[in-house]
Image: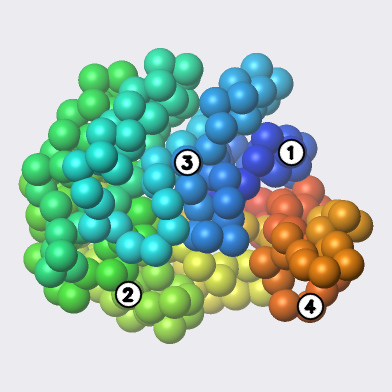
Amino acid sequence: MKVEICCGSYEDALASYKGGAKRIELNSALYLGGLTPSLASLKFTKKYTDLKVICMVRPRGAGFCYNEIEKEIMFEDAKILLENNCDGISFGFLDENKEIDKESTQKMVNLVHSFNGEAVFHRAFDCTENPYKSIETLIDLGVDRILTAGLQDKVEKGIDLIKELQEKYGNKIQILPGSGINEKNLENIVKISGVEQVHSSCKGFGKDPTTYAKNFDFGYTTDENNQFEIVLEDKVKKFVGKADKL
């Protein structure tokens, strides 16, 4: 059972590494669903760990229908990250009809594969309306892996579709379930779906006492505890340990 940890920084990557993970998805701004990471965070991760690093390439929050300027930035970001030894790129391109943007997806797959990396189509897949048409398109375009919650907000809700996709297409493309997977539900999710890998945040919270000023704040949580998301090493250890037993 392969485990991928969703990381928002080099510190998260280090916690994942110490916790026994072998692969991470490296992002920034996890509170926006994950954006392109800094180059420094990738360099430090590759220098001080032996993790397999899949880098998110996403220029902004919201959806995945990008204009030409955004696409130009995405391809340049991907190229820079690949030139600095990331092991793959996580990305997603949709058109205004919520279908796969074939041209942009093919271009990204070709770029990633030219560096012998893995091309991962992220949860933009879950925004499409016909998962069968979408996955067959991604297979035809040469995508290596899909990160999905089964077109739901959490894997447990989309588990039946994930099981179906794994059974029907698992020999043609890797199915990576992610969103809401933890130590408690891992075994059941794997048993039902039959997948061979999982994606988890192993999330906790750090605190920054300077988040709130007298007349305004820089927070993005609602509990006013100065919190931000981090990966907890102990959670990774428990999650990886549970996965190893499966």
Residue, far bottom:
157
Label 4 amino acid? Asp
Q: Pick whichever of labels 4 and 1 is earlier in the sequence.
A: 1
Where does label 4 land, which residue? 223
Q: Mark 3 near mark 1, Cβ–Cβ under 8 Å? A: no
Q: Which residue does the image show at 65% across and 41% down from the upper left? A: 9
- 158 left or right, relative to 231: left
Where does label 1 land, which residue? 11
Q: Label 4 crowding class (10 Å Cα cut-off): few <14, some 14-19, many 20+?
A: few
Residue 194, position as x, y percentages in the image: 39, 65
Where does label 3 land, which residue? 36
Where does label 2 land, which residue? 151
Q: Secondary structure at mark 2?
A: loop
Q: Label 3 crowding class (10 Å Cα cut-off): few <14, some 14-19, many 20+?
A: many
Q: Secondary structure at mark 3?
A: loop
Q: Label 1 crowding class (10 Å Cα cut-off): few <14, some 14-19, many 20+?
A: some
The residue lying toward the viewer, choosing from 7 and 145, is: 7
Label 3 amino acid? Thr
